[in-house]
Amino acid sequence: MSQLNEHGMDRRNKPGTTANGTPITRIKSTDLFRQMRELEIDHGGRIYKLRLTQLNKLILTA
């Protein structure tokens, strides 16, 4: 099956849906990092660090 839709656009570039059909929110990493290379995420009282590497990869650590 082609990855292109009827308009020639890559299907993989649009946000997906969960198993029950709810749309998944997509956030651009540039909006998330805002010129920084590292940020902290508080999840249930536990702090995680999300880093952007020199090779432009994401690393999430607890």
Image (cartoon, grey):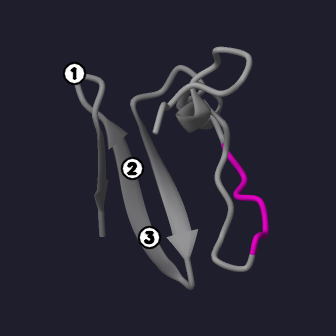
The Cα atoms of the two marked residues, 1 and 2, are separated by: 13 Å
Q: Are marks 1 and 2 in contact (CB under 8 Å)?
A: no
Horizontal and vertical percent position of residue 2: 48, 31
- Determine the residue positioned at 67% across, 45% down: 15
Q: Residue furthest front?
A: 1
The Cα atoms of the two marked residues, 3 and 2, are separated by: 10 Å
Q: Is residue 13 left or right of residue 51?
A: right
Q: Amino acid at mark 2?
A: Leu
**Label 2: few (<14), some or many (≥20) within 10 Å?**
some
The Cα atoms of the two marked residues, 1 and 3, are separated by: 23 Å
- According to the image, label 1 marks what residue? 54
- According to the image, label 3 marks what residue? 47
- Image quarter for residue 61? bottom left
Q: Residue furthest right?
A: 22
**Region in magenta:** 21-26
In this rendered view, identify the residue nearer to me: 40 or 11: 11
- Determine the residue positioned at 50% across, 31% down: 3
Horizontal and vertical percent position of residue 11: 60, 34
* Residue 22 forms part of the magenta stretch: yes
- Determine the residue positioned at 30% across, 24% down: 56
Horizontal and vertical percent position of residue 45: 54, 83
Q: Is residue 56 left or right of residue 40?
A: left
Q: Is residue 26 left or right of residue 43?
A: right
Q: Residue furthest left?
A: 55
Horizontal and vertical percent position of residue 31: 65, 30
Q: Is residue 47 left or right of residue 14?
A: left
Nearer the N terminus, badge 1 or badge 3?
3
Residue 50 marker? 2
